[in-house]
Structures are given as C-alpha cells and as structure tokens.
Amino acid sequence: MNANNESRAFSRKLADLRHDLRTPAGHVMGYAEMLEEEFEDEDRPDVMPHLATLRQAGALIVDLVEEYLGGNRTRRDEVSLGGITDALHDPMASITEVSQVLDPLLVGTDGATDLAKIESARKHLVDLIGRMPDALGESGDSGEVMPAPDPVVEAALPVASVLGEGGVILIVDDNEANRDLMERRLRSQGYDPVTAEGGEAALDFLGSTDVDMILLDMIMPGLDGTEVLGRLKNDAKLKNIPVVMLSALDDMERIIECISMGAEDYLFKPPNPVLLKARISATLEKNRLRRQLAPRLQVFISSPSDVEPERAQAKRVIDRLNEELAGKVYMIPVLWEDEPLRASETAQTQIVAPRDTDVYIGIFWSRMGTMLPEHILRPDGSRYGSGTEFEFEDALAGHEENKRPEILVYRKTAQTTVVLDNRASVLDRLDQKEKLEQFIQRWFSTEDGLSIARVYHAFESVEQFEDIFERHLRKLALDIIERG
C-alpha cells in the first residue's frame, strides 16, 4: 500500500473511532438535557447542579475527541492515544461520581430510567476507550476526512416561523438511544416524531405512511443513509420529502455527496437543540413555501354512480401526483361528495362549474344519471337529460370559449350485470344504457357513425383506468404549466 492509500485508510479508521466515541458521549449530553428540562419547573436544588455537570462532562468528551483525534490527522504518529485516555479520565470520573449521587435522588421518578441510560452510555465509552488501539490497527475503507465546521453561535440562529412548525418527522437511526433522544427532543419542540430502526424499515414505513420530513442517519448497518437517500430520490412518490442527514462522522466528503443527491441539509450528532430546531424549521418552511407557490389546477371529476371505484381511484391518483410533482403543480380535485351540499338546492348550483376549472375528467360505463330540475336549462331552453350531460356540455362550452378546461373522457367497456327478478330495475338499466349510447353517438361520432369526431379512452378494469389516467393527467398537468 502506498503512502497516500495508507493515509486515507488511517483517516477512515480515525473518523470511525471519532463517530463511535461521540455517539455515547452524545447520549450522556442528551439524557442530561432531558432531565434538566423535566426538573426545570420543580424546586430541586439537590438535582439540577448535578445534571448540569453530567451535560458538561458529555460535551467535554465530544470536544476532547475532536482535539485529540481531529480530522486533520492522517498518520498514526500524529495521534496520542495515551494523551486522549488521560484527558478523558476527569469527565469520565465525573459521570461516574455524579451518577452515584443522583441515583438515590431519582428513585421513584421518571428520571431514574434516563439516569440508567446515562450509565449505559458511560460503560459503552469505557469499553470503546479500552479498544482504541485495536480500532486504529484494523483495516478500513479509504476516504479523505475533512475537518468539521466551526460551531454555530446560538444567538445567530433564525427564529422559527409558523410555516416551519409542526408536522410528522421520521427519525431513521439504528441506535435505540439516538432514536429515543431525538424522538423526545422533537416532541418537546412541537413535532410529531415517528421512528424506524434502519433503512429497510424506513422504506417499508414510507410505502404506506406520509411524513413531512426525514432525519436520516448516515452510518447504519444494511442500507446506510446514502443508499436510503438514493432510493428516496429515485422514487416518484417519495422524492420530494425533504431529508436532513445526521452523522457523528465528520466526513464532509460524504455529506457533500448527500447534498448533491438531494438532501436538504445535515446535522452533526449530537445536535445542539437550538440548531436542531432551526434546521428543521427552515427545511419545513422552504418545502411548504415551495408547495404553496406552485401553480394550482382544479380538476373536475364527473361520473354517474356506476363508476364509484374509478372516481375514488381518480382522487388517489391526484394525491399521488401532488406528491410526485410537489413544487411544480398542485391539483385540487372537485368532487361533489367532498362538499357540504345543502338539501335545499341542486348539487350543480353548489359546486364550482366545470367551465371554471382547469381540467374536466368524465368517466362513463352503463348509465347517465337522472334528469335535472326544470330550471336548469341549456342556452336553447331545452332540459338536460342528466347532471352528467350538464357537466360535460358546460366543460365543452368553456373550452370552446376560453380553451379551458382541458377535457379527458374515459369509458369502461366491461360487461354489466342485471338482476332479472325486478322488471322496473331491468327497464331502468336498459333505458340508462340507451341514453349513454345516444350521448356517445352525439358527442364522439360523426353523422355517418364511421369516423371519430372526439376521442375517449376505453378501459376494462379499475387497475387499467388507474394506469391510463395517471399517465394522462401527469402529462397534461405538466403541459398546462409549461404553456403558462
């Protein structure tokens, strides 16, 4: 191995060691902070100074790790393991002594559980410190490590805006204590945190649940953070969820790679609570503003009652496309069942007219619906045969006058079934089928009945409709936005 490769390999091992030491030190800091917040409103002068000592000891360990094992070192002779071991003695001893003092004071309180977690972190640190020579003597991956950025001055952080408040945040971290600390921190800051213990679990969760943001650990077994990020950004449904990377590994080269792949930001662990709040708020605010400023399209969905599954599927497709095209366009489905329709008036007078929307979707199968009241008439004074006819003709008139809405029509070709034990029902179905054929003949065939004047799209099943409709609406929405 040449000198450059040896230097890179050593840098990688040193970065891994820093990561391993910072993680339990961060747990000491984090749980001490949580305990301080829990006892802040209680008159416990016997507890609060000791908790501050624990938090400061954890912070000092993090600082010492950087001082003695910082990323500017690339050779074994630049690292004094004896020096860092001696330097860590005092803060480690403080954790032991203070924990022993606090143990009887916290018996019977919720704080006893957190104190036990601090003790677990201390034992983990003792084990890691003892194994430092082995950690630096093992082979590692090559890769240049850059120094960590300067600490952030809390006073310079922006105040969180309302747009950055609240929301569901998925925490992805293989370390249980990390997940616990982050979950409790976010909950105290007004967010709704959920957790996943690894990359595969996170992707499974996101397949069925919507979130506003993801905090993604960079170093995990199995799928690491970079691989998970790549899958997210290559998934049409998930690619617009903002992701902030988390790492105790001060490897700026990998962080820059994640930013170039689409991550919104990054945080080093353990994150400062004020900085954590500021980064999350800024990320959510930017994403929500992007969505608010996107052009909006109203999509009118018209159909008789015999295609209710397709109607529901159309709404789901619109929801899915809104996620995929977030920031580019936002589509608003217009459905009568979503409106608080009053019994005193007809539905057509209470919802937005098709001619005033951007896209009209007509779905037909075996019926046209019932005739409208006498006061709803065509311009020539004739009555509409059904609400479906009114909606189609209104959309068509709007398009001919103003080039909007765009019109997409779908016809289901699957066979219908009729129960023969009810003569009135059979005759009604036949009458409805005849009205539909007359409608299709009038608007989608020429007088000779041989050539097509307007186009509708045929489909057999709900699944086929979903596929065709999603492709059509995606292309049409982007075309409308491009045309302005």
Image (cartoon, rainbow, N blue to C red):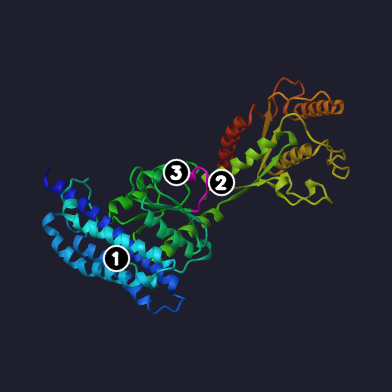
At a point 36% along the width and 55% down the height, the residue shown is: 246
The residues colored magenta run: 205-212
Disc 3 from disc 1: Cα separation: 33 Å
Q: Position of residue 415 (x, y in %)?
A: 71, 23
> Looking at the image, which is closer to me, 363 or 438?
363
Mark 1 or mark 2, earlier in chain: 1
Residue type (three-letter) at the residue carrying disc 1:
Asp
In this picture, residue 130 sits left or right of residue 219: left
Disc 2 from disc 3: Cα separation: 20 Å
In this picture, residue 80 sits left or right of residue 182: left
Task: Tell me, yes or no, if residue 71 can be seen here.
Answer: no
Residue type (three-letter) at the residue carrying disc 2:
Asn
Q: Give yes or no for contact between labels 2 and 3 (Cβ–Cβ under 8 Å).
A: no
> Looking at the image, which is closer to me, 153 or 190?
190
Q: Give yes or no for contact between labels 1 and 2 (Cβ–Cβ under 8 Å).
A: no
Residue type (three-letter) at the residue carrying disc 3:
Leu
Q: Quadrant of residue 376?
A: top right
Q: Position of residue 402 (x, y in %)?
A: 69, 44
Name the residue carrying label 3. 203
Mark 3 or mark 1, earlier in chain: 1
Which part of the image, by quadrant, shows the N terminus? top left
Q: Element under label 3? A: helix
Task: Tell me, yes or no, if residue 23 can be seen here.
Answer: yes
